[in-house]
Amino acid sequence: MEPKQFVPSKFCLSCDVCCRFSEADSAWSPALTDTDILKLPKELINQKNKFELKSYKDVYLCPCFRLEDNRCRVYQSRPFDCSLYPFLLVKKDNKFFLGVDLKCPFLQDKQNSHEFQGFVKYLLAFLGQEDIKELIKINPQIIGDYQEDVIFLQEINLS
Ligand code: SF4
Ligand code: SF4
């Protein structure tokens, strides 16, 4: 129950944007669904049901991030939120949207391409599946508030 990936993993492995955050309680750290919490090591999750980020130099790292090789050590069971990124679910004025975070350098290059348009179409169909809509409805924490750098792509109907 995870979407296909738009960004090639080879590109991600040489990027230093994901999995690092500027604050210990960053709004950008992954929101965890009930299912994510069951799959992930309990000692990595705090009382707010978020990852307990670890201070490292001038940033905070996801506890699942492996600095040595720039990889996620729970990749096969990573949170739904992480599998969606750099796309994300956002709300504004009581409406829900599929958005994209332009902090992702791959997206910055691709946002006007046919490939991107095609992927957005695919993702909207993926999010429109009944089981995915249900997952989102019972885990509203995965729909974030409007954030700087996020572009709203299309409204999503969860009913
Ligand atoms: S910001 Fe984009 S390219 Fe960089 S690791 Fe994240 S998804 Fe991959
Ligand atoms: S769970 Fe994995 S992909 Fe998600 S923020 Fe942590 S290290 Fe990155």
Image (tube, rainbow, N blue to C red):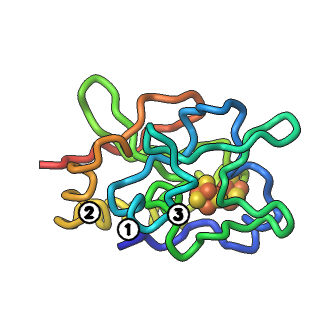
Give the numbered dot on residue 122.
1
Residue 41's label in the rendered image is 3
Please tell me which residue is depicted at 73% across the width and 68% down the height of the picture.
71
**Can you name the residue that lies furthest to the top here?**
93
Which amino acid, mark 1? Tyr
Residue topped by disc 2:
132
Residue 127 seen anywhere in this rendered image of the structure: yes
Q: On the rendered image, what quadrant is the N terminus found in?
A: bottom left
Of all residues, the one furthest to the left in this rendering is: 159
In x, y percent, where is residue 60? 73, 40
Q: Disc 2 versus disc 1: distance between alpha carbons?
A: 14 Å
Amino acid found under the numbered disc labelled 2? Ile
| Residue at x-position 68% and y-position 52% | 18
Question: Is 86 on the left or on the right of 11, as rendered?
Answer: left
Tell me: is circle 3 under 8 Å from ligand 2: no
Residue 104 x/y as whole percent = 67, 49
Q: Mark 2 or mark 1, which is nearer to you?
A: 2
Of labels 2 and 1, earlier in sequence is 1
